[in-house]
Amino acid sequence: MVERTTFATSSNLFDMELTTSAAPQTTVPETPLLYNKHAVKLPFTFDVTQLQAELAQIPAEAWQVQYEGDWAVAPLRSVAEHPGIIYAVLGGGNDGFYKNTTYLEQSPCMRSVAEQMKSPVGAMRLMRLGPGAKILEHKDDMCTESLREFRLHVPIVTNPDVKFMVDGKRVNMQPGELWYADFSKIHCVDNDGDTERVHLVMDCLADENLLKTINDAIEFDMIEQFLNGIGIPTAEGVIEEDTFLPGVLIHNGTITYDRNKIASPGDLLHEAGHIAVSETPETVGGNVGAAQPTNQAMGEEVATILWSYAALNAIGLNVKSVFHDLGYKGASDWHIDLMLSGQFNGLPLLEWMGMTASPAKAEKLGVPPFPHMLHWLRPVVVYEE
C-alpha cells in the first residue's frame, strides 16, 4: 500500500609454471561498469548445507597459511591443477590456463558455483580466516589496459562479528549468497567472532555477460532503495502470466517484478511513475498500459515518462536503463534526445499535479526547476464543496 590481494609464496614450481604458460590476453569489453559501487549482491544463491558438507571434506594439507595469523587458502582452480599453487594470475580465466584441482572435482556444489558463471573463471579458492584474525587494509589490482577481472565471493561459513569493509563501508554477506565487490578500493576484514569465516572466492573475466549482471544488480539495488524510500514498495517474485511490461506487475500500489523476465531494471521506475502520478495510487494495478487508453491514461503516461526521467536523474541511473532499446515502441532514443536537450513534453501537466516546477515557476518559488521534484508522490488535493 502506498503511503504518501596479492599473495606471496616461495614456490619454485609456481615460478616455473608462469614462465612456461603465460596467461592469454583479451580485449576489454565494450560495455563499461556503469557505477562506482563498493559492493552488491548478485542474483545467485547456493545450497549452504551442501557447501558446508563439502568444506568439511577438504583435507588439512590443502590449506596453506598466508602471512601471519590464522589466514589460510585452499586452491579449487589453480595453474596446471597444482594443489600447491594459490596465486591468482590476471587473465587466468581464459581457457586452458587454470584447471580444477582434485578438491574441486570432489565437490559438486562448489563446482556448480563456477559452472553457473557464464563468464570464464580463473583462480578459485577457499579463504579461511580464523577467530580473531585480520586481513589488513589493502587494494587488489584486477585490471590492465587490455584485461579486467572481477573477484566474487560466496560465504560458506561466517558469523555476525565478521567486519568486511570495502571503501569504508561494511558489507554483510550471508552464507550461500554471491557478491561482487570492488576490490580495487581499500578493503579489510576483521573476524571478531569465536568461529572461523570461510569464503569461496573466484576471479571471473569481466566479459559482457558479467558486466551486465553486475550493472543490473546495482541498478535494481539503487532503484529499490529509492522507491522504498519514497513510499512505493517493491517485491521480487515469480510472474507466470504475460504482462504489458514483461516481468512487472502492480497490485495495490506494490510493484512485483520477476528478475528473469524483466527487460531492464529501469522498467521498475516507469511502473513506479504510474503509481506516483495517480490520484488514487492504491487502485493502480494489473497490467498497467495494457487497457484501451483513455485521455486521462494517456496524460498520465506522459507524466509517468517525465517522472521516470526525474527519478533516474535523482538516483544517478544511466538513462538507457529506463529508456532502453526494447521499450517505448522503438522511440527511446527520441525521448532521450528531447529530454537531454531540455524539451520536456507534458511538463505543464506534471506541474499542474503539484509535483514539479517549470523554470518560470521555479524562479518565483525559489526552487530548482524540473527535473528537480517538489513531491515524488502526487499531493492529495481536497476539494471544498
Image (cartoon, grey):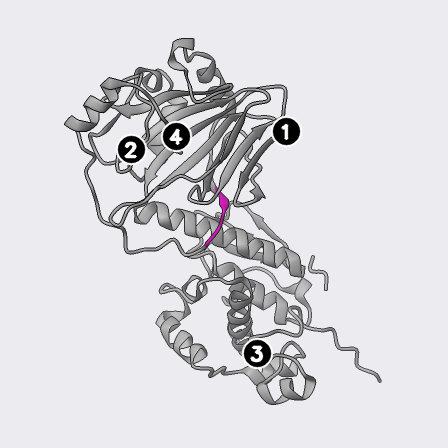
User: What amino acid type should be assigned to the residue bearing mark 4?
Assistant: Val
Residue 239 spot, x, y in % from top left:
50, 48
Check disc 2 and report the residue beneath it: 89
Front position in the image: 303 or 59:
59
Check disc 3 and report the residue beneath it: 370
Crowdedness of circle 4 by 10 Å Cα count: few (<14), some, many (20+)?
Answer: some
Front position in the image: 215 or 334:
215
Could you tell me which quadrant the N terminus lies in?
bottom right
User: What amino acid type should be assigned to the residue bearing mark 3?
Assistant: Phe
User: What amino acid type should be assigned to the residue bearing mark 1?
Assistant: Asp
Side of 278 relative to 271 (left or right): right
The answer to whether residue 22 is above or below residue 357 is above
Label 2: element kind:
loop
Could you tell me which quadrant the C terminus lies in?
bottom right
Start-end of magenta stretch: 36-41
Residue 301 spot, x, y in % from top left:
53, 74
Of badges 3 and 1, the one in the foreground is 1
Crowdedness of circle 3 by 10 Å Cα count: few (<14), some, many (20+)?
Answer: many
Query: Which residue appears farthest toward the right when viewing the image?
Result: 385
Q: Are marks 1 and 4 in contact (CB under 8 Å)?
A: no
Crowdedness of circle 2 by 10 Å Cα count: few (<14), some, many (20+)?
Answer: some
Label 1: element kind:
loop
Check disc 1 and report the residue beneath it: 161
Of badges 4 and 3, the one in the foreground is 3
The answer to whether residue 298 shows anywhere in this view is yes
Distance from disc 1 to disc 2, alpha carbons, whole Å, reads 31 Å
The answer to whether residue 172 is above or below residue 366 is above
What residue lies at 58% left-to-right and 20% top-to-bottom?
131
Query: Upstream in the sequence, badge 2 or badge 3?
Result: 2
Check disc 4 and report the residue beneath it: 113
User: What amino acid type should be assigned to the residue bearing mark 2?
Assistant: Val
